[in-house]
Image (cartoon, rainbow, N blue to C red):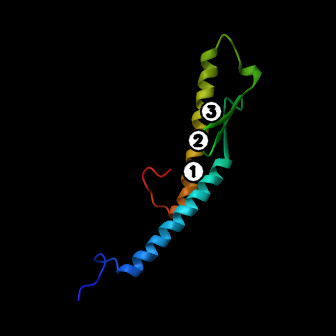
Amino acid sequence: MAKKGFPGMGGAPNMNNMMKQVQKMQKDMEKTQAALEEKEVEASAGGGAITVKVSGKKEVISIEIKPEVVDPEDVEMLQDLIMAAVNEAMRGAEEMVSKEMGKVTGGMNIPGLF
């Protein structure tokens, strides 16, 4: 008599166990995503002249610019500093999200997940 289920998968009892694990992982991921939304990453450029905060949702929360860095004669430098700080904060947020979600997924890289 042939076994039910997929070859090498061990049949229905293991499939049920796998489904429970997937459901648990999904719940854990939802909790982690909610917690990440509350976290912030901060980065600065120009020796602290520009400070940017980004949420775990990868949204810019705030940009602080010290008055002494604002020079109407050199707007390009200010733009570069803002861009550098935003990019660094976004990288930090991405790293934070990947690290936290990696804990939930056991390090599995699931495309499009986060």
Query: Looking at the image, is mark 2 or mark 3 earlier in the sequence?
Result: 2
Residue 86 lies, in percent from the top left, at: 60, 33
Residue 57 sits above or below residue 26 on the image: above
Q: Looking at the image, do the residues carrying marks 1 and 2 touch, with CB atoms under 8 Å apart?
A: yes
Amino acid type, callout 2: Lys
Instruction: Give residue 110's quadrant in the image.
Output: bottom left
The residue under the point 43% across, 76% down is 16
Question: What is the crowding at mark 1: few (fewer than 14 residues within 10 Å), some, or many (at least 20)?
Answer: many
Lateral position of residue 84 relative to residue 17, left or right: right
At mark 3, the secondary structure is helix
Q: CA distance from mark 3 to mark 1?
A: 18 Å
Q: Residue furthest right?
A: 67
Amino acid type, callout 3: Ala
Instruction: Give residue 14's quadrant in the image.
Output: bottom left
Mark 2 lies on residue: 58
Mark 3 lies on residue: 85
Q: Nearer the viewer, mark 3 or mark 1?
A: 1
Residue 26 lies, in percent from the top left, at: 52, 62
Query: Looking at the image, is mark 3 or mark 1 earlier in the sequence?
Result: 3
Residue 21 sits above or below residue 111 on the image: below
At mark 1, the secondary structure is helix
Lateral position of residue 103 relative to residue 1, left or right: right
Amino acid type, callout 1: Val
The residue under the point 57% across, 50% down is 97
At mark 2, the secondary structure is loop
Mark 1 lies on residue: 97
Query: Looking at the image, is mark 1 or mark 2 earlier in the sequence?
Result: 2
Residue 102 lies, in percent from the top left, at: 53, 58
Q: CA distance from mark 1 to mark 2?
A: 9 Å
Q: Residue furthest bottom?
A: 1
Which quarter shows the N terminus? Answer: bottom left
Q: Nearer the viewer, mark 2 or mark 3?
A: 2
